[in-house]
Amino acid sequence: MAKSLINISVKAQKAGVFTTAGDLLAVGVFEDTPAKSLVKALDKKLGCRIEKLKKLGDFEAKPGSHCLLYADGKLDAKRLLLLGLGKRKKIMLDALRKAAALAATKAVDLKAKSLLLSLHTDVPGSVKLDWVQMGQTLAEAACFGAYRYDEYLTDKNHKRPANLKVVIVDSDTAVVKKLRKGVSVGVVTGQSQNYARTIANRPANVINPITLAAAAQKLAKSIPGLRCTVLDEKQLGAKKMGGILAVGQGSATPPRLIVLQYVPAGATKKTPAIGLVGKAVTFDSGGISLKPGAGMHDMKFDKSGGIAVLGAMKAIAQLKPKCRVYGLIPAAENMLSANSYRPGDIVTTYSGKTVEIQNTDAEGRMILCDAITYAEKLGCESIVDIATLTGACVVAIGQKRAALMSNDAKLIGRLEDASDKTGERVWHLPCDDEFVEEMKSKIADLKNIGGKWGGACTAAAFLSQFVDKAKWAHIDMAGVGVWGAGENDAPGSIGFGVRLLTAFAMNQR
Ligand code: BES
Ligand code: ZN
Ligand code: ZN
């Protein structure tokens, strides 16, 4: 039986930074520490050790740097972690996020059971970062950094505690009140993101379309206001969802369309609905157009878009935006067998449009197109799909950002806003008519691959053909969903998209 993962809690508390007991105290340090600041007061207590470290060049407080000290009884916390925040005037939410995540990572490494966070205290008032936003960011980041995926490690002597209590400390009642407001949101998003990471990290022999649907149903049962229905292969057949069925037909586990729904209290027929659509290919072998062996195991992460939607729906149902939100997750396993769909097949999609299959490895678009049509039929006024769709996207823009394509400038703006707030970064790419031309087939309405170049753009252009009235955006997250072993203490899924989609839904009218 898989064991439970680390249990993380976060709160803001009115308390003195130097006089609160804890296993680890993490303090944010600027390169240019002002005379009147928490860090100066701390340094005085420590006999100017921070200043000495700076002079030696051992800790210059550059962004991303850190230094662990032992306070020798001068503080009530057992250990002190200094976290570099860079230049004071340049401070942005992102630096706080990274520092808080690092603090939580180090806390878990040190087997600390409690982490006191004081990163925000010396942020200058001239910088437009409000306490509510900071509280949210710190809480999200603490959840993020403390995460470990170890449910299948049977070694009992794990290098991590069962629980981590994170406390954001501040001595000012008014500040604590605002921080708390943000923390209450940040904990929800942070926990939802970690939930998504766990489902994404689970291998394909555990998560398949059926078990993924069961997980979605279990989630919906646990949150009032979240509903879940699942279309099985018979229902998909009755609706003629040929795209999802074609991709799923080669697998021993049949495909599913998972439909999650959040309805705000007091909603009427006029309440606008948004649709979040996520690709959940629980394993992408490439099918008959088989992928090369090297790295194929990572294709268990090809469900990450769908799981981003699942995680976002978990958060959304708790944070309760004013709009209706549908979470649509087409789930299939792309396998090879006597039943697999083949190159050359012509598939009739749910929209009625026909697609000539030229490569069975371009399967994501085949399941997404049916789900997009479904979102249209539900009356969603905007639709955002998210998918690990193309290797070409990673070639084009690398692993730091997801690509964003859309048919609506305002929608791009809204998603870019959400991206700025959440630190889940996107970069706008084109997908206009020139790319659509490449996706036309001579024997069907469309084909499922384009030419040699611009594969991320042609894939998006293909999807655009299934959008009717809605404003639509597509996020290709092929490059950003996963951290490799060695780069970080928590290799595996980073739950990309949960914060972005949640912030996007919360900003709707
Ligand atoms: N799941 C892959 C895309 C992918 C590649 C995600 C690398 C994450 C990392 C997708 O289904 C795929 O195989 N796409 C093909 C499309 C091609 C056949 C047009 C690709 O990118 O090679
Ligand atoms: Zn593929
Ligand atoms: Zn795929």
Image (cartoon, rainbow, N blue to C red):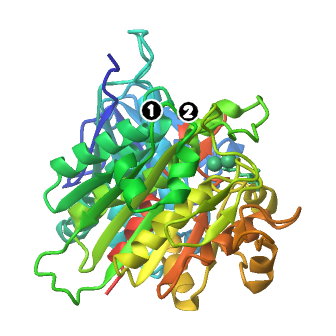
Discs 1, 2 touching: Cβ within 8 Å: yes
Of the residues shown, which amino acid type is indicated by label 2?
Asp
Of the residues shown, which amino acid type is indicated by label 1?
Arg
Kindly identify the residue that appears in the image at 77 percent across and 69 percent down. Answer: 443
Is residue 82 something that shows in the picture?
no
Q: Where is residue 416 shown, x and y percent of the image?
A: 55, 78
Exactly how many numbered labels are in the figure? 2
- Estimate the spatial distance between the alpha carbons at disc 1 and disc 2, rounded to whole Å: 8 Å
Q: Is residue 27 above or below residue 6?
A: below
Query: Which mark is first along the chain, 2 or 1?
Result: 1
Q: Where is residue 136 shown, x and y percent of the image?
A: 34, 63
Q: Is residue 79 left or right of residue 340?
A: left
Towards the viewer: 394 or 353: 353
Q: Is residue 369 left or right of residue 16?
A: right
Task: Name which quarter of the figure residue 324 lies in.
Answer: bottom left
Q: Is residue 67 left or right of residue 127?
A: right
Kindly identify the residue that appears in the image at 55 percent across and 33 percent down. Answer: 489
Kindly identify the residue that appears in the image at 17 percent across and 48 percent down. Answer: 221
* Residue under pointer 1: 148
Q: Residues within 10 Å of mark 1 (few under 14, many from 20)?
A: some
Q: Is residue 325 above or below residue 298?
A: below
Towards the viewer: 455 or 360: 360
Q: Secondary structure at mark 2?
A: loop
Of all residues, the one furthest to the right in this rendering is 452
